[in-house]
Image (cartoon, helix red, strand yellow):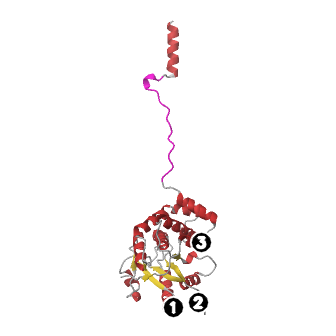
Amino acid sequence: VPQPPVDPNAVFLNIPYDEQFHSLYIAYIVGIYQLRFVPFIASGIPGGKRRLDRVLGLIKSCRYSIHDLSRVEVSAAPGATPRFNMPLELGMTITWAELNPERHEWFVWETSPYRLQRSMSDLNGTDPNIHNGTVEGIFSELRSAFVFTQTPPVSQMVKAYRLVESKLDRIRSSAGTTNLYSATVFKELCFVALNAVERTSPKNKL
Amino acid sequence: MSRSVIVTTPRPSIDSLVKRLRIPKARQRELLAIMRETETKAPVAFKVKKATPAPSSRVRPAKAEEGRKRAAAAR
């Protein structure tokens, strides 16, 4: 079976789609663009395919994936259900990368060092990238995960992030939605993130 | 020690990444306008208060009229 081509700059973001994650979500988009990669999220792909097919398609076509498990927890809503989407998508990715090691690299990101050992002991031996739940942590870990000859400093990434964050309400109201994870808003956030990257890093060539 | 990869592929330009997004030109312009908006608030137009005369120079119409009447009666 012919496989879809791999985009060498594509990064699939396996992240929670909730409001508490907004700042880290924006940080991922800005940081990934700072490194001149292209972020993808499952809800950012328009079309009628079912979510699982979209996720599988992204895993296959992206060279890299980041699985942020920092919010894998029991939901606060009555009936307290654990959130399994992110571990499920990580499992799919691991399988794909095991079968096609030259096509995919995956990373697990966590908020604190030993949480992964407790939540998913099968991954013992896998060193997670720890972002401490902060924007600076995301940038710092992106810089250590993707090594270039020249990477922008965290301070420059933070500058671009602050620029996007300061416009968030305006972007939201002009898009007429509060959902930052919809396909259209995701694309628009990517656009403003690129603009912020350009404005804050005038001569930054990687 | 977290995982890392050494990236050797040439990095794409910002322009090429923007093109990939395929956002309509009109919407791009709107978003750029939002990005260009300055953070400082527009200067407040100060209302100039009319100068209030000092209490001693104030002439109360009713009292002035009363004074005039009293002066006329005295004459």
Q: Is residue A28 visible?
A: yes
Q: Secondary structure at mark 2?
A: loop
List the residue tagged with mark 1: A100
Q: How far from the left and from the top, in percent, is residue B67?
A: 49, 15
The residue lying at 60 percent from left, 62 percent from top is B29
Part of the protein shown in magenta: B40-58
Q: Quadrant of the N terminus of chain B?
A: bottom left
List the residue tagged with mark 2: A3
**Whole-Å distance between the Cαs marked 2 and 1?**
10 Å
Q: Are marks 2 and 1 in contact (CB under 8 Å)?
A: yes
Name which quarter of the figure residue A71 lies in: bottom left
Q: Is B51 a magenta residue?
A: yes
Q: Secondary structure at mark 3?
A: helix
Is residue B73 placed above or below A74 in the rendered structure? above
Residue type at the position of mark 1: Asn
Specify the label residue B19 is tagged with. 3
Is residue A151 placed above or below B46 in the rendered structure? below
**Mark 2, other Cα within 10 Å: few <14 / some 14–19 / many ≥20:** few
Which label lies toward us, 2 or 3?
3
Q: Nearer the viewer, residue A77 or A127?
A: A127
**Whole-Å distance between the Cαs marked 1 and 3?**
30 Å
